[in-house]
Structures are given as structure tokens and as C-alpha cells.
Amino acid sequence: MKVLVTGSNGFIGKNLIAELEATTEHEILSYDRDTDVSLLDSYCEKADFVFHLAGVNRPETEAEFMMGNFGFTSTLLATLKKHNNSCSVMISSSIQAELSNPYGESKKAGEDLLKAFSNETGADVLIYRFPNVFGKWCRPNYNSAVATFCHNITHDLPIMVNDPEVMLNLVYIDDVVKELTRALDGKENRQGNICEVPTVHTIKLGDIVTLLESFKVSREERSIPNMVDAFTKKLYSTYLSYLPEDQFSYPLKMNVDQRGSFTEIIRTPDRGQVSVNISKPGITKGNHWHHTKNEKFLVVSGTGVIRFRNLNSDKVIEYFVSGDKMEVVDIPVGYTHNIENIGESDMVTVMWVNEAFDPEIPDTYYLEV
């Protein structure tokens, strides 16, 4: 298909085009305010589907609302009619189309134009009234509080919250793009005369700020949030996309001695922590047991042996491990255990434990295997 996308350089346009180019063979006809206006005529002649995402959100004068949201829609539809093109047209409207304000009225006017176009030509039209949309590539300090907060917090700039109790209805950009690609296949989610993104998150503005600030702290604490909640997962991905380009990395505290090193990578509130252990040749580490802590060891480089002994037995169990054949070894509770580097180079082991280390309750007891 030949797919015309107006507002191609905008937030939703960029994400939609990236998805279509990555996953389909459709020819994308990109049109934005900087595109040669003469191309609109040829695009409207050959388009098989139109995503009309162009619009005005923050103009210098209120008159520009109608000019951008009604005027260009009128031009687009007139050009389609000129070429007798009755392809399906999707329009990006807003929940504010139900309100009496200049922005909402301009969006409603654009909707009405599209309905009239459908009545006249028989074209299938899809009117999407989006709530607040958030995600990567959204412009900060424009019309998205989430984008502004993400940008400011990652750049150590102040934020302003007038009313932390205000409730926001939000849709994530990936959910928007998923719905639009379904619409392209004729599987849109219609609710009467309006189409909707089925997954909407409702959350207090203050709670969003609390989460974003916790994300900032998490990099200092080598932690990641609980991702069970879908909104937290999406917001965390969004937050990371606003990091300054010179701050993608952060240092870790390496605990180094003559035996090698031990470095904690990540800790979580509910899924334990992950660390990397480096052992010098001939070095044995461990010789301890746990009541409740359980671990998984994965040697990714070098050669070693992991030994176990049940506290109630003299029998020693050995597992020989190597980065040449990676396998996970579970460390059960009630077994004293150690790991020895029996190779000639450093042995690197990725270690997971089911709970983050707490010096007040270490649950670690020394005992030779």
C-alpha cells in the first residue's frame, strides 16, 4: 500500500513511520510542514490510506488553531476529492473536541469535515480522539507534561506541579501505533462513531512525578522498579529515552581484592539482585550457606567447579562449569557451597540472588564445604 502520513515529523508520525518501515513493505508518503507543498497533490492522487496526524497544539495566536486543524484538513480532503480518491482517512483528534475552547473547537471542526467527506465520497473515515499521549520522541515543554517532566528531571532542571491530585488519562505511544497499524488492516477499535486506543492509563499527576523521581534515584542505587505494573514499565522506558547523550552510562562500585572482584549490577524490590563475580586462577570463593537466600550461578568466561554439601551430610557434590558451555547452576538453601577457578585465566560468573543484600539480615553463614 501507499500510505500518506501528514505530520510525519511529529511525535505520533515519527513513531508510526518507524514501525511501518520496520515491519511492513508499505510505501510511506511523508508530508510535514517543511515538505514541498506541490507533493501533496501527487500524494493524494496515489494514496491507498491516509493517516492525518498534522495539527496545531501550541500556536502563537488562537486563530492558528482553526487554520492548522481545520484549514489544512480542508485542503487535504479537497485534494483527495480532486483525484476522486475515496481511500480510508484516519484523523488525529482529541478528547478536547467535546469542549468549548479554541483548540477543541478546531479539532471538532476537522472531525466534521471528515464526516462530510465520508458522506460525499463513501470513504471510510476513522476519527481518533486521543487523550494525553506519552512515549519516546515527544517534545518537552510543548503540550505533554510527561515529556516535560522526563526532560527536566533527567537534565536536573526544576519542575512545576500545580495540582498533584489532578487525574490524567494517558495512552502510550506504542499502544497508539499498534492501534493505528490495526486500523490500516481494517481492524480498528470503534466505539460508535469514534475510534479509540483500547489501553488507557489513569493516574494522578503527583504519582507520575513520584515515579519519575524514583527512576532518577534508581540509577544511583543500581535498582530498577517493579515492572509488574504496565504503566510503570512504559513510563520507565519513556524516562530513559530522555537521558542526556553523555549520561547513558553510570559507574558501579567494584569490590576488589587479591582474589578478584565482586560487583553488584542491578537490584530490584521484588526479584532480587544481579552481580558479576571475577575470580583469579586458583581462587575459591564462598564456603557459606543460607536459610532463605537462593542463587543462580552462570559462568560466562573461564573454567571452574561449584561444590555443594548438605549441612546434614558429608557428601560433596561437584558441578564443573565453563564459559564454553554455559549452564545455570541453582544454589539451594541449606547447602554450603563454593566456586573455584580451576582454569588459567580469570573466571567470570554472573550471579542472581532472590533478594537484595541487607547487611542487617545477611542470611549468610560461613562453613567449609
Image (spheres, helix red, strand yellow):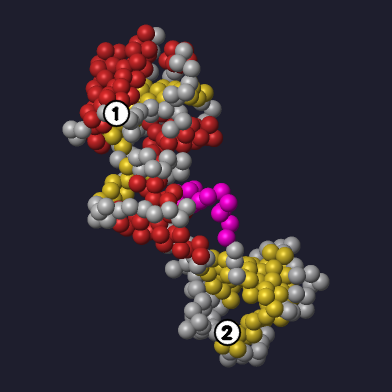
Q: Find residue 299 and name its label.
A: none
Looking at the rendered image, the disc whose residue lies closer to the viewer, 1 or 2, is 1
**Image location of residue 346, percent across then percent down:** 75, 70
For label 1, the SS is loop
Residue at the spot of label 2: 289
Disc 2 crowd, CA 10 A, few/some/many (<14, 14-19, 20+): many
Q: Is residue 50 highlighted in magenta? A: no
Say above or below: 306 vs 170.
below
For label 2, the SS is strand
Give the amino acid at mark 1: Thr
Q: Is residue 240 highlighted in magenta? A: yes
Is mark 1 in CB contact (under 8 Å) with mark 2?
no
Can you tell which quarter of the image residue 107 is in? top left
Residue ID at (64%, 75%)? 255
**Image location of residue 315, percent across then percent down:** 66, 87
Specify whether residue 5 is in view. Answer: no
Residue at the spot of label 1: 61
